Image: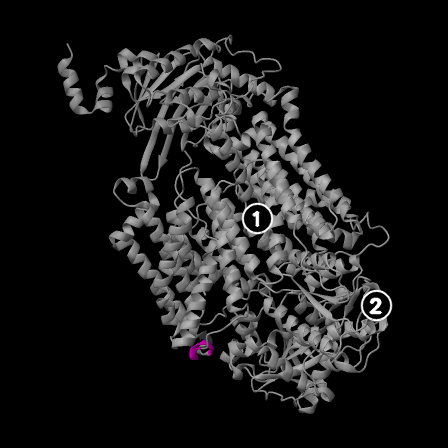
Amino acid sequence: MAGGPRGRAAGLLPIALVLGAGLLLTFTLQERYHHRILTLVLVWATMGLSWNIISGYAGQTSFGHQAFFGIGAYVTVLLILHAGLTPWIGMLVSAAVAVVAAALIGFPTFRLSGIYFALATLAYPLILRIAMDFLGYQEVAIPMAREQPALYMQFRDPRANDLLCLGVFGATLLLSRAIERARLGYWLRALRENEAAAEAMGVDTFRCKMAAYMLSAAPAAIAGAVYAHVVLYVVTPDSVFGTLAIVQTLVVCLVGGIGSLWGPVIGAALMLPVSEMLDTWVGDRFPGIQGVMYGAALVAIILVAPEGLYWRLRGLRRGARPAAPPVAVVAGPGPAPAVSRAPDGGGEPLLEARGVSKAFIGLQALDDVSFAVRAGEILGIIGPNGAGKTTLFNVLNGFLPPDRGEVRYRGERISELRPSAVCRRGIGRTFQVVRSFPRLTVLENAMVGGFVRDAEPAAAGARALAALERTGLAARAGALPGSLTTLELRLMELARCLATDPRLVLLDEPLAGLSAEGVEAMIAHIRRLPAAGVTVVIIEHTMHALVRLADRLLVLDHGRRVADGLPAEVTQRPEVIEAYLGTRWLRRAEHHRP
Amino acid sequence: MGGIYAVMSIGLALIFGVMRVVNFAQGDFMMLGMYLTYYLAVAYRLDPLLGALVVVPPFFVLGVLVHRALLVRVTGGGDPQRQMDAQLILTLGLSLIITNATTMVLSPMPRQIRTGYATEAFGLGPLLVNQARAYAFVMAVLLAVVVFVFLTRTDLGKALRAAADEPEAAGYQGIDVRAMHGLAFGIGVALVAAAGGLLATYHPIEPTVGVNFIVLMFVAVVLGGLGSIPGAFVGGLVIGLVQAVTLLVLPLQLQNAGVFIAFLAVLYLRPQGLFGRRLRTV
Amino acid sequence: MEPRQNAAVTRRAVVLAVVGALLGFTVAPPAAPAADDLTIALVAPLSGRWARQGQLKKMGAEMAIEEINAQGGVKALGGAKMVLREADAGDSVEKAVSAAQRVLTREKVSAGIGSWLSSFTLGVTEVAEREQVPWLTLSYADSITERGFKYTFQTSPVAGAQAVKALDLLLDLARRNKTQIRKAAIVGDNTAASVFFFKPLREKLLQEKGIELVVDEIWTPPLADATPVVQKVRSTQPDIIFFSATALPDSIQVLQKTKEFGLRIPIMGNGVWLLMPETVKALGKDLVEGVMSTVAAHPLKGQEALVKKFKDRTGEPFMVQDALMTYAHVWIVKEAAERAKSRDPKAIRDAIATLDVSAGPAASTLVPGRIRYDERGRRLDATPIIVQWQGGEPFTVAPAEFATRKPSWPSGK
């Protein structure tokens, strides 16, 4: 699990095995050509792993990753040429250049998301490629250094090449594993699964993406530098910035399966030997057919395992034996439960909205809404569909900036903050439709929240487990969200939100879709929150549940505040009944009134 | 040039808009369209401008078949992101097969359809406008108009758009979304093949000609706003225009760099593309 | 992540990966040639976009090998037969280098030839140098023989020299046709081959000859539209266009445009691209008529029998540089083996380095009819040839003593 000496060592065994297999091959292979295949596998596995950091873990598919690969190759070789710098250092310089380039590219490009991001990244290596041609670097041969071959990475012994590639590959594996197990790894997977939910759980998605992008650029550059020295011997824009480089990377990753440490490794270990095999067996005799067969192999593999071989194998295992719940080794100091927090000082409202307005095209969603939330209360917000309730939440936690007005939390203006910053200040939220991270376990879902307070996975795990215990979900910690009931999903989202250690939670229709028993269970959980020092703001459109739950009600209609006050009082007001049930009901209500 | 980019891009936009498939083999279908037009021109002396129309039905069928035989197997169900990745590799594999097979069968050397008008120009004042390009442009615009009318005025076209915009709702209304995907893929492939045919009036044909255009197609589609048909059309025109305008400020060598820079600039200013709708984040 | 489960999955993954990797290493070497054969490796693009060039190279090499074997093989080696082992360089440097590594380490190769694009050659010769196998190439790039390699032999005139000699030949041609060249245009792409050709022209040669450079239009392939380029040429009316583009479609577009704009300016190209059978097929006889190009080899006066034999064997309409060059290369290896009296690549390398042949098929294929290499591996006195399209076929027109046709100077407008 996320802690303890066992957990810390466990992931290292397969890495050691793979590197051991690499060493074995290095010292048993006889033919130079076989050594070359080995180096190709290792270089492309490294490149795949690097792509996997940004596009696998973080889910930001990039079609332009070869930009860093090419930077690695060009910077290293040009440094040899113009400054006589050994590639051992040049390689590190090129990695630094690539990281800077990643920052420069990422900063504007992460404004885009999904396929827009993917296609925008396509442009960078193409521009670099054209630039290299323009600058006259069509063919940059690596000058031969006869005197100091080792200093210039020009080994006669192919085993030295293997070891070099193995070292780079091993380092990238360890980097990937470290990311996977660190807070960043959890956050990246969370934002890949659901960016909005991650942001609401305190994940600064922009900074996380930037971090992942910069981290992934370095190994790509090193792979490029090594590729130039042990595979190409001559650098051309086409061979390092061209489409072939990214196609190879995509093939390696997608065949192997993205988002896991082993996908790119499996993909490279399978596809490169296959490609060379085809070249040898048929390519030299029937030129061209190897390309057709390689394409057919790709199609066949994807038809058999659309999600990639690693996930396919894993799926087969899962199918054969239900997933064992994880060993919940809670190590380190348990979190101080947030039970005994002194109520916030006196009459000062915890959260205050002042004159908040928000319009969408042709629709005034919020119109001059003001209200205050007092510490320790349960405030219910009701209103018919389209009244602006969810929009109000989106403004409160920072998803939407208000057009006018402001939101203050404990005296601080928070209406310009990112949702993640709002969350870190102590405002958690849940969503109308549960936004889980489907490929993370229940515990990991909650851990994403826990990381807001603890950077260490062990501590965050403990915090998450505590939150699951509070909501009675501890037994389901190892399950995937897909196997949960609606109630459990809602509870999981609540636990995730509580794991951020909030002072205030915004619950968006937490009772929707629940059975009668479910509603009771949920209400019981929510009722316990104020005693634990958590103030609650809750949206519902089922009036009767809220009347029982809330200390105070706020009624919205057409984006305006219609009424607020004690539940019993508010529900009797004619304007509320009109807004909520329509004028016909108003007449009936008046008729029935004694 | 812009007009043909526009028709190519419409085909890709249709496929992307309706199916969310990033089709890497699109350039290869275009290449095949060029070859078929070439052989029609050589064997039957069919003018490539007409040939471009003749290739539409067979390529429509080809597109539908490819969709039926391959794409549906990884479409539908599961995680949309992974599905997209799988389809991407699938079309990549397809592209490898088509390019290599064509090279083997038809030789890698370029061919050219020789028409009387390919080397003739209209004199418009001081400007000379190539006749082949002019005819191709007119045909391209006509094709685009036909597609547009089909999508907006016919029931089938409306159903197609419904399947693109609201696949679930369309399903409830009894629209066979899968059939619509097949239809979109078929039309998309047919359009790009037709664009290839038009291109063949003045552009040499070789098995790898597709890769030169696929990137520009993607740029045009994104520029116009993914999935937007008029957007893709305008995107294609814009690329042609930017290529021409770039020459006034940058050396010819950097012509396509100019296109990519313009592309990035548009994306930074309007992340949803020129005609795209902004997606609500929450 | 759950480590235990993960470990189980990764164990499988490791097994799979190792199996996959091992599969790659179980590739059985092809049937070994008889021990007393002399094997030559040909690394050239046989698939992908440059496959046509590779096929031509193969045709030329095969023809030479057949001739040699029919004459009784390598006599110094007891009549050893020559064998060609081709490896597909595909369309990337990675593939080309892999192919060289494959063929050089899995077989007893005495010498290697080929590899087309200069970037491929740069990578492939690196392998040959490490494996200590002599390599003969027709690539033009100066850089190939600037690295101090001992096993690389460049039979073509290097690009820098080509520009010098091509300009001399051209000025000579112009003089004979009583025209003067005052203004020149440079038009082409920025691939390596073109850059090497243009660079000396632009930097000093034209100036030395008092020629003004009026247009210098370079593009990054593929060329979207030749109109702006040709428009510039049209508005400046140079006396000669120096043209070089590695992608034939780009050349086709430019030539079509020159006709569209009614330009009648002599075109001096570089490389074999302009001289392929497909060029005339795509453009038509009229469009290519008069277009010239400099190449490293083209059928010379006295080679008519050879060309006829080649045409009969292959069905090609004429013979071009690539086939001629590999033909000559195979013969050069044969001559070297006769002198080395050995199959050992090192011995053959030494023999090539000290070779001086001025008779036989190898020598008669190349201008100036004598084959010697200098200490860098460049052929001494290697002279480019100017070829011109006449009546739908390219003919050698310069140097005059080797020409098969008289040059015709397109009359200026």
Give yes or no for residue A267 being in the magenta stretch. no
Establish if B141 lies above or below A423.
below
Residue at the spot of label 1:
A64
Dot 2 falls on a residue whose secondary structure is loop
Contact flag, marks 2 and 1 (Cβ < 8 Å): no
Establish if C380 lies above or below A573.
below
Percent position of residue B115, x then y: 43, 77
- Of residues C363 and A151, the one nearer the viewer is C363
Q: Is residue C206 visible?
A: no
- Of residues A350 and B83, the one nearer the viewer is B83
Percent position of residue A297, x then y: 52, 50
Dot 1 falls on a residue whose secondary structure is loop
Q: Is residue B223 visible?
A: yes
- Of residues C276 and C351, the one nearer the viewer is C351
The C terminus of chain A lies in quadrant: top left
Residue A28 shown left or right of residue B159 in the figure: right
Residue at the spot of label 2:
C342
Q: Check disc 1: other Cα within 10 Å, few if <14, some if 14-19, many if 20+.
A: many
